Amino acid sequence: MTAPRKTPDRSRRSARSRRAIFDAALALIGEVGYAATTIEGIAAKAGVGKQTIYRWWPSKAAVLLDAFLDLGDQAAMAAGADDRASAIPDSGDLEADLKLVLRATVDELGDPKYDLPFRALAAEGAVNEDLGVEVVERLLRPQRQLYVERLRAAREAGQLREDSDLEIAVDLLVSPLAQRWLQRTGPVTHEYAEALVEHVLRGLTR
Amino acid sequence: MTAPRKTPDRSRRSARSRRAIFDAALALIGEVGYAATTIEGIAAKAGVGKQTIYRWWPSKAAVLLDAFLDLGDQAAMAAGADDRASAIPDSGDLEADLKLVLRATVDELGDPKYDLPFRALAAEGAVNEDLGVEVVERLLRPQRQLYVERLRAAREAGQLREDSDLEIAVDLLVSPLAQRWLQRTGPVTHEYAEALVEHVLRGLTR
């Protein structure tokens, strides 16, 4: 079966609708939370028919997850990367590279465009196991994998302890920042991100 | 003003009502989430009049937070401590003491009695800033302080680097486990807790 070739106009309209739907979805989830966000509400806010959304996505969770993935794409493009799954830079200086990436994460978490929608998604993922598993697989795992790869390169270059567990290393780099932001246990700043990297790499004991 | 002296019978009744209210509150929040849990629902489930609850607590958040604090008291008593705010043991071996405490945390997070209510509280605290701040001040900060004190003793004994930041050290010990549990990014086991402590103390670099 051959799909009818889209005219440029139709593609442009589709891209515009997609953008409007993502923007509406993120705004709504930030305003009213995950549970109260509906396909109907997204359609109304985006100015499209709800059939348009149902044609492209099987469920509310699917459109919201795509909206978050798109937000990641936008952030990566704003940072000059080709796509979301761009590697963590490898300058040979692991500490400097990790500080660069975590400072960027601090900026992202402090951006109101991300803050409320991400909180709503994290909150729902905590209590809704199906959604939580999808968030991990589609959103978190690919991001964590970038850290694993950068850390593996450092270990292969002889910079890390041979017996270091890379999944635990990623936990140490990303969880404290994520928890501090989500639970508001302290300020989320560039200084914190940098001190965190130093503590993780050097350890606590003398 | 002198409060009327309570007869033993009346105290026993109060203690029984309090326990029934806490149990009902934790069960309900686990079943229907924070938002849908009401004073009326708690009263009905506990078999008390809702005026009993309103007499003792000013708000739903207040009764739920007290229920969680009481859960902490129960866990501490089950572990043989005198009260919730019992210090982390100091055997002189920091690594062993931290592993002991984090293994106990793993057991607590894996207990169905805690899992759903804590998820509901964490989820609501993420999106409801007033509640989030109360959870930090009343529930998390006192727990974190126990780690700070144990780590300070280790630093004073010359076991930790002089320049280690104790708040960051606590983040490194508690956030990876909390995030892994909340987001389900990996198994929450004794083995994980032990490897985590080793990585935090020794650092990643050679």
Image: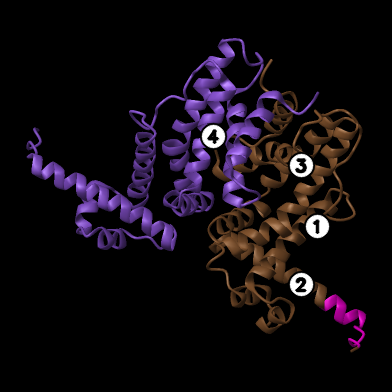
Chain colours: A purple, B brown
- Please name the residue that numbered disc 4 is placed on: A102
Q: Is residue B5 magenta?
A: yes
Q: Position of residue B20 (x, y in %)?
A: 73, 70
Magenta-highlighted residues: B2-13
- Please name the residue that numbered disc 3 is placed on: B104
Q: Mark 1 or mark 3: which comes first in sequence?
A: 1
Which chain is mark 3 on? B
Pointers 2 and 3 in contact (C-beta within 8 Å): no
Q: Position of residue A87 (x, y in %)?
A: 43, 24
- Please name the residue that numbered disc 2 is placed on: B18
User: Element under label 2?
Assistant: helix
Q: Which of marks 3 and 4 is in front?
A: 4
Depth order, front residue of B179/B100:
B179
Q: State whether residue A35 appears in this view.
A: no
Which residue is drawn at the image coordinates 26% and 59% (left, top)?
A: A43
Mark 4 and mark 1: Cα distance apart in space = 37 Å
Which residue is drawn at the image coordinates 86% and 50% (left, top)?
A: B86
Mark 2 and mark 3: Cα distance apart in space = 26 Å
Label 1 crowd (10 A; few <14 / some 14-19 / many >=20): some
Q: In this view, does B132 lie to the left or right of A203?
A: left
Are dots 2 and 4 on a single chain?
Answer: no
Mark 1 and mark 3: Cα distance apart in space = 14 Å
